[in-house]
Amino acid sequence: MLALSNVVIHFDGKEALNIASLSIKAGEKVAIVGPSGSGKSTLVHHIYELLRPSAALCSQRQGLVENLSVYHNIFMGALNRHSWFYNLINLALPFKQPLNEIGQIMDRLELSCPLTQPTASLSGGQRQRVALGRALFQQQAVFIGDEPFSALDPIMGQRLLAEVLSAHDTVIMVLHDVNMALENFDRIIGLQAGQKILDCPVDELNFETLQDFYQQAGSCQQNLTAEYSSELDLAKNV
Ligand SMILES: Nc1ncnc2c1ncn2[C@@H]1O[C@H](COP(=O)(O)OP(=O)(O)OP(=O)(O)O)[C@@H](O)[C@H]1O
């Protein structure tokens, strides 16, 4: 389904990602782990660009429209399903069918706020579930998530992960919860400083091996950040 080779991405002259090869088969459930700044978001956004429009993305940035309602923010996930005329009328006077469909998604996501509530007045966890709802509403075969449960309590996060896994054939998800990754995914990819240093089926991994990975990758990341900061300081002083 996806085969990457020699993907290098830079931001402001600094390398954020350098993946020699990575492939993901249709039907796989893949978790991506790694310390902060190791390139996880950069990788999943790159994958999304390659797989769209047949993948749904639930990104950390969410991209909600603050003054629009929960209903409209979720509906916006699938504007391409209808004509611009349908979308325009639905903006002013929501149709019954999407209202029902979105109501059901909200039930599955345990969102009990009114459909008409502006997203600006929602809590962090509610906002995250609206972003998740927008991705679910797209009904794609592939779900790409960037820490989609980070603002939720762990029990709710586990329930909503089950919803996402059952609604999509292929799931590629950035997670910081190592147990969640081990218990629910087929394979774990670990990044360190933009590079893939771990790529294993979960049955070859356990909590301790992943803790070791985080310790090693985290200290490498800190060294690189310190190096980059001193380079920046030097550049400023020139
Ligand atoms: N738009 C951007 N402009 C400049 N630098 C960026 C941008 N996006 C990411 N970076 C840099 O690229 C590197 C990788 O960032 P990325 O967000 O992919 O890491 P991450 O592993 O997802 O981190 P986190 O776990 O904190 O979300 C970081 O050094 C980050 O500062």
Image: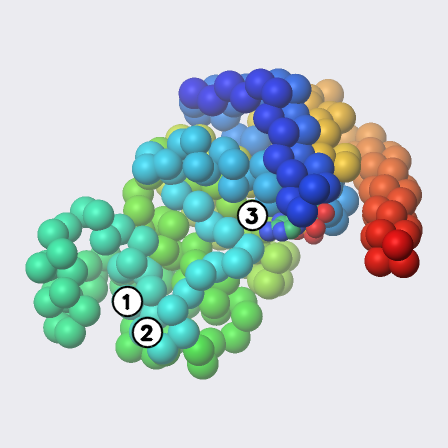
Residue 149 shows up from this direction: yes
The yes-or-no answer for disc 1 within 8 Å of ligand 1 is no
Q: Are marks 3 and 1 in contact (CB under 8 Å)?
A: no
Task: Please state which of residues 25 and 36 is positioned toward the viewer in this rendering.
Answer: 36
**Which residue is identified by label 1?**
72
Q: Could you tell me how far apart the alpha carbons at marks 3 and 2 are, in whole angstroms?
A: 23 Å
Task: Tell me the kind of residue under disc 3.
Answer: Asp
Q: Provide the secondary structure element on which disc 3 rests.
A: strand
Task: Please state which of residues 158 and 9 is positioned toward the viewer in this rendering.
Answer: 9
Task: Tell me the kind of residue under disc 2.
Answer: Leu
The structure residue drawn at horizontal position 63% and vertical position 29%, both measured from the top left corner, is 8
Q: Could you tell me how far apart the alpha carbons at marks 2 and 1 are, in whole angstroms?
A: 6 Å
**Which residue is identified by label 3?**
146
Q: Are marks 2 and 1 in contact (CB under 8 Å)?
A: yes
Percent across and percent down for residue 167 are 38, 40
Percent across and percent down for residue 189 are 66, 29
The structure residue drawn at horizontal position 54% and vertical position 21%, both measured from the top left corner, is 4
Crowd class of label 3 (few under 14; some 14 to 19; many from 20; radius 10 Å): many
The structure residue drawn at horizontal position 13% and vertical position 73%, both measured from the top left corner, is 93
Q: Could you tell me how far apart the alpha carbons at marks 3 and 1 are, in whole angstroms?
A: 22 Å
Q: Could you tell me which quadrant the C terminus lies in?
A: bottom right
**Which residue is identified by label 2?**
68
